[in-house]
C-alpha cells in the first residue's frame, strides 16, 4: 500500500523551531520528487517546498525562503522539513506529498502561538 | 491572492454536468501541465486528474480535464452527492520557480 505518514507537528511559540518528518512506503521513494504543502485553518492549499529525488534541486515558496529547509534521506525513505523563525502565519496543517502531489499523507498540525 | 484563479463556488443537481475553471498565465498554465485534486472536509486532498487530462487509476471516468491557452477546466458528468468537495488545480510557475495552487472551488450538490 502506498503511504505517507507525517509527524512532528506541535504547538510552538513565535520565533521557535520545529522539524517535521514524513515516512514513505509502498512506492520508490528514492526516484520520486517530494513536496510539502500546507493548509491554514479554513483556507486553501499552499505549496511550501519540493526536492528532487537525489536532493540536487530544491525550491521554496517565497514566504518561507531562508527560514525553512527541506531535506530527505533515501536510505530511510524519509522526507523532512526544518522550520525556523516560526511565525503565527505559519500555523497550518502540513502535508507531504509525492510526485504530482500524489499520494498525500494525513497531515500534521503546526500551531504557532504565544 | 493566488496567481491561479478558480471560482469560489460551483453547484449542480444530481446527474448534471458541472465544470470548474482554473485561470492562469503564460508562466504557469500556459506552459505547464495542470493537475486537479478534490478534498473532503477533514481529510487530505486526492489527485483526480493529472497532466491536463489524465485520469489516475480508480478515478471514475465521470471526471475529465481539458486545457486551452492559459485556462484549464475540470468537468464532472453524472454528478453524484459524493462529489461534493473542495476542488483545487495546480501548476508549476516558471516565473516564480514554484508550484501554484488555485484558491479552490467548493462544489455543492443540490
Image (tube, coloured by chain):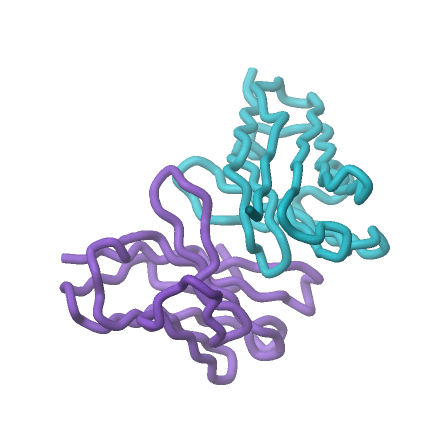
Looking at the image, which is closer to me, B15 or B101?
B15
Judging by colour alone, the chain drawn in cyan in this rendered image is A
Looking at the image, which is closer to me, B77 or A85?
B77
Q: Position of residue B3 (x, y in %)?
A: 53, 63
Q: Look at 62% across and 52% down and name the residue there.
A: A98
Name the side, left or right, on which B101 lies relative to B13.
right
Looking at the image, which is closer to me, B66 or A1?
A1
In this rendering, is residue B27 above or below B39? Answer: below
Q: Position of residue A78 (x, y in %)?
A: 72, 39
In this rendering, is residue A82 above or below B26? Answer: above
Q: Look at 61% across and 19% down and name the residue there.
A: A12
Quadrant (top left/top right/bottom left/bottom right) for the C terminus of chain A = top right
Q: Position of residue A60 (x, y in %)?
A: 71, 50
**Residue at far top of view:** A114
Q: Look at 48% across and 66% down and name the residue there.
A: B56
Q: Position of residue B41 (x, y in %)?
A: 34, 41
Name the side, left or right, on which A113 lies relative to A34.
left
Looking at the image, which is closer to me, B12 or A53?
A53
Instruction: Determine which quarter of the picture holds residue B84.
Output: bottom left
In this rendering, is residue A66 above or below B21? Answer: above
Judging by colour alone, the chain drawn in purple in this rendered image is B
Please count the marks in the image: 0
Name the side, left or right, on which B77 lies relative to B74.
left
Q: Look at 46% across and 53% down and name the residue there.
A: B46
In this rendering, is residue B65 above or below A44? Answer: below
**Residue at far bottom of view:** B68
Amino acid at each position: 500500500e502506498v503511504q505517507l505518514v507525517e509527524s512532528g507537528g506541535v504547538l510552538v511559540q513565535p520565533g521557535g523551531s520545529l522539524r517535521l518528518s514524513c515516512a514513505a512506503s509502498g512506492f520508490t521513494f528514492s526516484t520520486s520528487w517530494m513536496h510539502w504543502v500546507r493548509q491554514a485553518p479554513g483556507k486553501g492549499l499552499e505549496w511550501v517546498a519540493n526536492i528532487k529525488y537525489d536532493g540536487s534541486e530544491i525550491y521554496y515558496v517565497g514566504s518561507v525562503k531562508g527560514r525553512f529547509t527541506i531535506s530527505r534521506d533515501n536510505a530511510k525513505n524519509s522526507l523532512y522539513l526544518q522550520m525556523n523563525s516560526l511565525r503565527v502565519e505559519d500555523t497550518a496543517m502540513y502535508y507531504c506529498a509525492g510526485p504530482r502531489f500524489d499520494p498525500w499523507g494525513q497531515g500534521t498540525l503546526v500551531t504557532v502561538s504565544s | 491572492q493566488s496567481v491561479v484563479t478558480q471560482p469560489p463556488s460551483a453547484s449542480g443537481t444530481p446527474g448534471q454536468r458541472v465544470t470548474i475553471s482554473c485561470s492562469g498565465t503564460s508562466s504557469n498554465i500556459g506552459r505547464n501541465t495542470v493537475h486537479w485534486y478534490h478534498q473532503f472536509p477533514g481529510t487530505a486532498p486526492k489527485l483526480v486528474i493529472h497532466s491536463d487530462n489524465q485520469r489516475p487509476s480508480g478515478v471514475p471516468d465521470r471526471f475529465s480535464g481539458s486545457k486551452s491557452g492559459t485556462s484549464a477546466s475540470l468537468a464532472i458528468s453524472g454528478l453524484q452527492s459524493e462529489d461534493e468537495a473542495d476542488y483545487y488545480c495546480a501548476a508549476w510557475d516558471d516565473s516564480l520557480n514554484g508550484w501554484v495552487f488555485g484558491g479552490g472551488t467548493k462544489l455543492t450538490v443540490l
